[in-house]
Amino acid sequence: MLIKTILNNCHRFKSFVFNKVCFMEYQKRQIIRVTIIPRKNAKALCSICKKTTPLYDTLNNRYFEFIPI
């Protein structure tokens, strides 16, 4: 079974989809890197006022320690 399939079954983001999944080394540890992208035709929401906006922000990459399983 694909890791992307497991993630989709365990944890869904309403306006985003899992794009690329790969293994890599980060701070001398093996990790699974998952790239998340905005869903096509999804309405972007402001994280502060919760109103729809014309586009998503483009912040730098961030790493989270998260296991939804």
Image: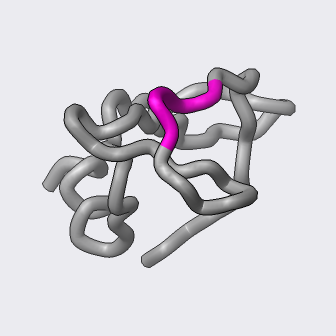
Q: How is the image coloured?
A: one colour
Q: Give the residue drawn at x 75%, y 30%.
A: 26
Q: Is residue 39 above or below residue 25?
A: below
Q: Is residue 46 above or below residue 35?
A: below
Residue 3 x %, y %:
29, 50
Mark count:
0
Q: Give the residue drawn at x 55%, y 68%.
A: 67
The front one of 3 and 60 is 60
**Left or right side of 52 for 57:** right
What span is in magenta? Answer: 53-57
Residue 55 x %, y %:
48, 28
Q: Give the residue drawn at x 27%, y 48%.
A: 4
Q: Give the residue drawn at x 74%, y 35%.
A: 62
The front one of 32 and 20 is 20
**Left or right side of 54 for 64:** right
Name the magenta segment's main secondary structure.
loop
Residue 16 x %, y %:
37, 46
Residue 17 x %, y %:
31, 44
* Quadrant of the rendering where the N terminus is positioned: bottom left
The front one of 46 and 68 is 46
The front one of 16 and 45 is 45
Residue that sits furthest to the left in the current view: 1
* Quadrant of the rendering where the C terminus is positioned: bottom left
